[in-house]
Amino acid sequence: MSTPYGEWPSPIAPEDVAEGGRGFADVRVDGGHAYWLERRPSEGGRGVLCRSALGSAGGDSAGDDDAPTELAPAEFDARTLVHQYGGGDFAVAGDALVAASMDDQRLYRLPADGSADPVPITPEPAEPLALRYADVAIAPDGETTYAVRERHAGPGTDDEPVNEVVRLPLRPGGDPGGGDAIPDPTVVAAGGDFYAAPRVAPDGDRLAYLRWDHPNMPWDGTELVVADLDDDGDPVEGSRRVALGGPDESVCSPAWSPDGVLHAVSDRTGWWNLYRVGDGDAENLYPADAEFGVPMWTLGVSTYAFLDDGRIATLYTEAGEPSLRLLDPGSDTGAFDLVDPDLPYTSLRPAAVRSAGDRVAFLGHRPDAPSAVVEWAPPDEVGTGGPGEADASVETDASVETDATTEADASVARLRESTDDPLDPAFVSVPRSVTVPTGDAVGADDAVAHAYYYPPHNPDVTPPEGERPPLVVTVHGGPTSRSDATLSPSTQFLTTRGIAVLDVNYRGSTGYGRAYRDALDGEWGVRDILDCVNAARHAAEEGLADPDRLAISGGSAGGFAVLSALAFHDAFDAGTSYYGVADLRALSEETHKFESRYLDGLVGPLPEAEATYRERSPLTHAAGISAPLLLLQGGEDEVVPPAQAASMIDALVANETPYAYVEFPEERHGFRDADNIARAHAAELAFYGEAFGFEPAGGLAGVKLLVGERPPELE
């Protein structure tokens, strides 16, 4: 007997999505150990510093120290709020680790083995959270720390926070733990609107860093700056020089090779390629229509790492499909070969590729097994390949082997997985890549978008004969970001219940070159929405979805896409907006510094583009929303403030559009607490049941659709 789509009994409860969503923010290697930062929803999203001995990969033994060890007490939450999105929250060298604390945003030092409590090494600010540190790096001397500091108080902060690069001692004089005064850090770079990636050369004689100014975002244009350092670690006056970059060239992920040669990723060819930087020139190590870089939404990005034998392990994204590759300098011509080790990982997010000399650590995701902190010992020789040689697309295959021990060979070890209770492989919906002809209102009729389609899949259920499943189009945030083919608990929560998912990489997404990324310039709210609409219609035309049960869901910029799709198009029958942008003009006035001029490029500069902001805002066209809408919002969101959701609700009430609202008072931009994550997933599924007329299995609490009245929590 068949079971209606949406009503399939699932092994994934809302609580399982939360508990199985342990995330990884960074990984470092030092002294024979891997260190990583994991976010635990079960602990309110606390950032937990962990380490494990290297040596499990490559046939060696990691000894008795191979189990992950927590390095800080339970009350320590490692997280920086610089740019609101953070990144580079910690660094490690020798016997010391430095990490930012969520509670006060100060930097703390603790033993690398976690044998003592953290002690502060930056002074307490005059106002709470006023001095924030990120992109932490310990200099080769093991005693000096560099970091990006974001100042929210003091000189120059009347209009917006001040960003700068600072130097501070790893072990300040006196006893900070005993109450002695901690000296203020020394400012070594200032005057720019933003800074990132302070990196000291192996000899300690040079400092490289990135800088950029409004209205650019780091994927628009940055400068790679190099300065000579004196004996104190401060830049020598007059030594500053630009190695790569400019207002129209994005540079990211600078790093020094072990022999002191600066490298960085630049998109000067239209693709983020890897360069070796010399005196007055920069050599492209492997020219390709492929991406060796990523958009720098978070700090601390590392997209490649140097091995002892001269090879470079690197993120490599070709035709939108990420993988880990090796650049091998062994060619007789002196050119690098690109080597594909055929690892099964289809995403390395966030980009944190690190080297321990003869092995690599990274954060790996794949479509058929949980995410993991991965240790890899590259073999001496593997097959070589070039652009276009390997087919990185992911095809639907219910028989995919998911035993992590067989994913490649003994050269790979999974040091920590995102869940202790992985989904039975029999229930996994593995995606396939989809190319969507999207057309364009401004004449680009040959335009295409990209997506991953996850079909409904549950071996315990017989689908209804002759019916097609409801579809949820998921829209990533950013919008300068991307979706990858991964085993997402949120996606599997739907597919195991008989709901298809289409994850769209609309024009403006990354991984397809600068032209595709720049296609959204001036067109945010137009092209991205058209791509989502056409992706849904394409799925219905191909028989992959019920054309009368199409939903759209997304967060932040993805939430804006939800609201815009419902306001300006009639393709969707329901929408779920997680902390979505409703009023573009208000966003430009209320959001944080990092994104305060983002809309200059996406929509247009103000006040010249005032009319466009109004034309593109879902709030001013809320009368066009007739499909049911679910709004979920964090009460402490500083990126998309709660006022955005409140304004949209007022418009929905006035228009008598059916809607539901769920508020999470203590959440910021993105939900981190397990209870809140579970509650949000339960609400979304129940909402689709209301909109599409099915009863979800599992006895989930219902969602009340309101018409013409405000929710009690906003009264």
Image: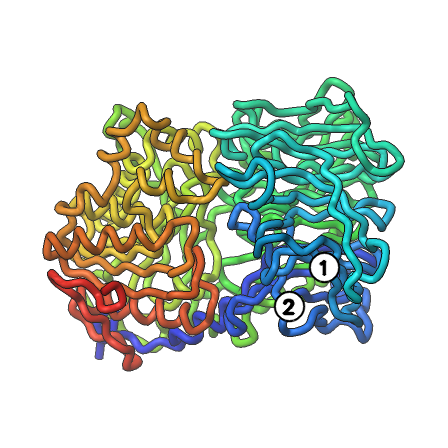
Name which residue lies at 37% across and 58% down.
454
Q: Nearer the viewer, residue 577 or 398?
A: 577
Residue 495 seen in the figure: no
Q: Please name the residue that numbered disc 1 is placed on.
A: 108
Rendered image quadrant of residue 670: bottom left
Residue depicted at x 61% and y 59%: 104
Q: Secondary structure at mark 2?
A: loop
Q: Is 418 situated above or below 624?
A: below
Nearer to the camera, 676 or 150: 150
Callout 2 amino acid: Phe
Colour setting: rainbow
What x and y, as percent, mark residue 626? Answer: 13, 52
Q: Residues within 10 Å of mark 2 (few under 14, many from 20)?
A: some
* Residue beneath disc 2: 76
Tag 1: amino acid: Tyr
**565 lies above or below 487:** above
